[in-house]
Amino acid sequence: EVQLLESGGDLVQPGGSLRLSCAASGFTFSSYAMSWVRQAPGKGLEWVSAMSGSGGRSINDNGGRTYYADSVKGRFTISRDNSKSTLYLQMNSLRAEDSAIYYCAKDRRYRASVLDYWGQGTLVTVSS
Amino acid sequence: SYVLTQPPSVSVAPGQTARITCGGSNIASKSVHWYQQKPGQAPVLVVYDDSDRPSGIPERFSGSNSGNTATLTISRVEAGDEADYYCQVWGSRSDHPGVFGAGTKVTVL
């Protein structure tokens, strides 16, 4: 059974930093693209960032093509540790408009395209 | 960036058919995916690649994509289908992630 467990959400002041983690299990983590999607209270979904998988190549390869929404480019960094089956999102220079539930999601393929499993989300609140 | 347009709401009686549209420029050239989100829950993929269903999704959910409009059809609507539905395509720019429509609230009367 695929499981995605996010953590790291918190209340942080504007300009602060936060690192989200997503522990994955139930599938070959390294093979699949992974993403972060956020949802502000009462709003729709916004795809924040994605990182391609290895497609079956070495699990020691933590690299992969990355994608960022314009709203977070230069402030957020996505990364993955295939040895730990864990996805990360480093968020710097946080703004009030970054407040949202952040979902970790698994892709159906090694290249990011469509999300077939989602975690339950972790809440980030940016406020003074 | 690529824009997906959905109606804010759709109302349907139980047992009837709900159709949710997703408009985009030449959207037929893209693969369209659909997600269902119930209050307080994470989204669930219900249709991918225009018309394929993940395992466990009822056959009542189907999709199509032509011209400038993709459509999610829910046949024989049940009370449990009441939810927000989002369409999604992969980004039109090489460095951008996917794009979601604004979502459609389906109300079962």
Image (cartoon, rainbow, N blue to C red):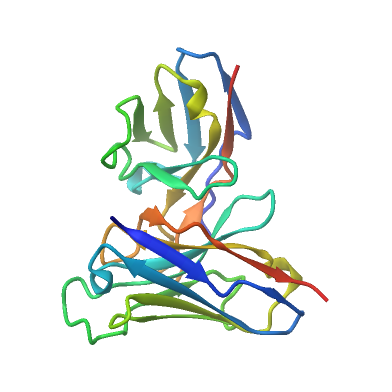
- Residue B66 or A112: which is nearer the viewer? A112
Determine whether, in the image, residue B21 is placed left or right of residue A10.
left
Residue sitting nearer the eye, A65 or B46:
B46
Residue A23, by quadrant, is bottom left
Q: Quadrant of the N terminus of chain A?
A: bottom left
Residue at horizontal 43%, vertical 60%?
A: B91
Please indicate whether residue A94 sits to the left or right of residue B37 in the image: right
The reply, left or right, for residue A64 in relation to residue B98 is left
- Vertically, is B99 above or below A73? above
The x and y percentages for residue B29 are 34, 47
- Which is more toward the observer, B15 or B26? B15
Quadrant of the rendering where the C terminus of chain A is positioned: bottom right
Looking at the image, which residue sits at the far left?
A57
Q: Which residue: 68% across, 84% down?
A: A93
- Residue shown at 38% from the left, 76% from the top: A86
> How far from the left and from the top, in percent, is residue B87?
47, 44
Q: Is residue A27 above or below residue A18?
A: above
Residue drawn where x is 30% and y is 84% of the image: A62
